[in-house]
Image: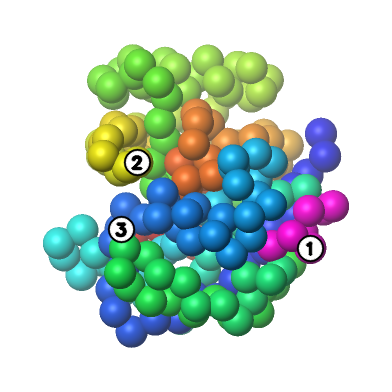
Amino acid sequence: MVQPIELAFPVMGRSPIPADHGYALLGAVTQLIPAVHGGNGFALAPIPGRQVGDRKMALTRTSRLVVRTSADRVGEFLPLAGKQIMLVGRSITLGVPTVQQLEPAPRLRARIVTIKGFFEPNEFAEAVQRQLDKLEIKDAEINVGRQRTIRVKQNEILGFETTLSKLDDESSLKVLAEGIGGRRHMGCGVFVPCQETNDGQDS
């Protein structure tokens, strides 16, 4: 399996941004880079920040816009550096990215995972396990957390915060590269090492 490359753009802004910003972020990125319209071949991780209430987050020094894509497409996303974009009426500025390979971790977390047709925690966990089986990942521990939503146009799509534990390096890299569920270009099913998030953050 060819491993994607990860670009991490520092994110700066004075005003809190919506915790649910995946669809708006995709729209802002495709407006600046029309060639990536359609969302194929890349994933956008949710921007992490500090919860401030009312479903909003304040940006911190560690807030990043993370793009995962193949090495031959890295150049398509570099023009985002230095750009100012709008997220639901809030202005943020993107810095110069770091570019690196994915690093495995034994415990991974996704802010929201969406799997069509599964809205109850137990059935959702079983659906996650089936996707892990397809990736030939065994013995992973699945923890289904709070129910979350992502707004796409006028629709609210249900999903769950999801944590995977007891992953070996090979399995961890598979999850980081392939994700779980759909809408990865909107931030769903994009996993990050748990140590990247701190208490009080929403990522």
Quarter occupied by residue 177: top right
Mark 2 residue crowding within 10 angstroms, few (<14) / some (14–19) / many (20+): some
Q: In the figure, 119 relative to 89: above or below? A: above
* Label 2 vs 1, first from the N-terminus: 1
Mark 3 residue crowding within 10 angstroms, few (<14) / some (14–19) / many (20+): many
Secondary structure, mark 3, is loop
Residue assigned mark 2: 152
Label 1 sits on what residue type? Gly
| Circle nearer the viewer, 1 or 3 | 1
Residue assigned mark 3: 19
Quarter occupied by residue 92: bottom left
Disc 3/disc 2 C-alpha distance (Å): 14 Å
- Is 62 situated left or right of 41 in this image? left
Q: Is residue 40 visible?
A: yes
The magenta region covers 71-77
Rendering coords of residue 108 (x, y %):
52, 45
Disc 2/disc 1 C-alpha distance (Å): 28 Å
